[in-house]
Amino acid sequence: MGFPEDHLIPLVDEGLGNSAYLVDLGDGRALAVDASRDLRALHAAAERRGLTVTYAADTHLHADFLSGAVQLGRDHGARVLASAAGNRAFDHQGLVDGDEVDLGGLTLRALATPGHTDEHLSFLLLDGRSELGVFTGGSLIVNSAARTDLLGADRTEELARAQYHSLKRLTALPDQTAVWPTHGAGSFCSAPPGSERTSTVGAEKRANPLLAAPDEDTFVSQLIASLGTYPAYFDHLGEANRRGPGIVTGTPLLTELSAEQVRTLVADGGHAVDVRPAADYAAGHIPGSLSIPLRGQFATWLGWLLPDTAPLAFVTADGQDLSEIVWQAYKIGYERLAGRLAGGMPAWTAAGHRLATTAFVTADRTDNRPYVDVRQESEFAAGHVPGAVNIELGSLTRTAADAPEGAVVACGHGERAMTAASLLERAGHTDVAVLDGGPADYAAAHGEQLVQGTEDTRS
């Protein structure tokens, strides 16, 4: 059979920077590859085409999201395909290098490609003897490769060497072979982060800087040098995926909580998470609450800054999608969702509880405050305000004391900076301001030029 181009349906999670894939096998059946636990988009795509997902393949034990494969087994009766070396604790078909699965006209061949994880497989999709494309998961990524430090610093170099050989194996495929990675633009699993999501073997051989390395040692040095920080929850999600995520029936609901219930929850060790836009949080919020505006990156910062062991109460604005809060939390294994403040902040003030506010200022109103840039080091190095201090947002839970008093906190637009300000306020800083804008706005307002590199900062 032929393979029409529109039978491959990429399902992009912009927030995590990942792609899952739904392959229409042409007879009402489908293959899902690297689907996350948030299956809303996949279910919608399958329903539009009248497809039943009969196979769910995972390239590796994901660190950045819970797999949806077990759920697809329950919802569609899908057969789960994954590496036998992953020792998954649920029903699946364990594959080793060279194993083939007959999809009914098409064939899926497992290729051992360790590096990102020990048990990593890529899946080559074949039509007869023709290589249509390869699902490279966390191995070959567009103009990049996946990071190799998720199993510990003591194994980073070993896995980087394995990654080198895996990429060599993949690029031995015919140049026209499509490359379908899981990790892509915005993914913290990419090293360094890429911009495109799909490619071909030939395009990668021409343009991927890691593939231009003249030898293995140079490749390893370049890959390791590109590794930035990653969210804290990555350290335990691989094991959660090995055990298998729990089945979810329907969309879990957020219980309505009174102001007094939220206050008690926080007093007992829980957390109030304010998902309203940054400007709303600045105008008035529960003292000690954490600002994480609800957007694509919500799950990343929730999992980076808070533990999954304490109950969470959410503060929302009118019209926000409560199911989005739930699914972003659930896809990274955060299920202790106590509920949301019924009536929002008006209910909090009506109950007689005090408000806290945060200065949210434009670039021309910063009053010569110290400038703290909470973006990733790579973003900072690409262009920052002269004299700025770089303290990555992800590190602030342990380094808040390092921030200068009376600082203006900034990121690219203001969302991460408001999160940082809420962490600083929780740590006792009382005179924090947030820049409504980014470094270019500040430089323009102060007649400065952005500088590159990290020489004049600490992180």
Image: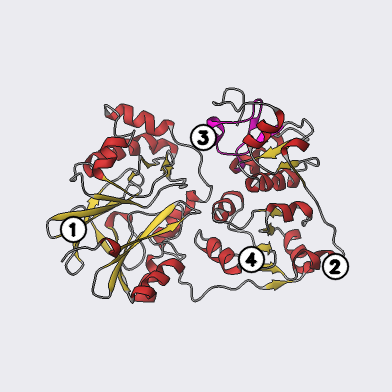
Pick the residue in front: 144 or 311.
Answer: 144
Q: Secondary structure at mark 1?
A: strand
Q: Secondary structure at mark 3?
A: helix
Residue 368 in view (yes/no): yes
Residue found at x 42% / y 71%: 44
Residue identified by numbered label 3: 378
Task: Work out which quarter of the rendered image holds the C terminus and state it.
Answer: top right
Q: Secondary structure at mark 2?
A: helix
Q: Name the amino acid type tagged 3.
A: Ser
**Disc marking residue 350:** 2
Which residue reaches farthest left?
129
Q: Earlier in the sequence, mark 2 or mark 3?
A: 2
Residue found at x 55% / y 61%: 329
Question: Compared to 333, does 173 lie above or below?
Answer: above
Q: Earlier in the sequence, mark 1 or mark 3?
A: 1
Q: Name the amino acid type tagged 2.
A: Ala
Residue found at x 26% / y 27%: 215
State which quadrant residue 226 falls in: top left
Pick the residue in front: 256 or 177.
Answer: 177
Q: Badge 1: how crowded within 10 Å, few (<14), some, or many (20+)?
A: many
Q: Name the amino acid type tagged 1.
A: Leu
**Disc marking residue 126:** 1
Q: Secondary structure at mark 4?
A: loop
Residue 330 position, x and y percent, is 52, 64
The magenta region covers 371-393
User: Of discs 4 and 2, which sits in the foreground?
Assistant: 4
Q: Badge 2: how crowded within 10 Å, few (<14), some, or many (20+)?
A: few
Q: CA distance from mark 4 to mark 1?
A: 44 Å
Assess whether residue 232 is covered by the magenta stretch.
no
Residue identified by numbered label 4: 320
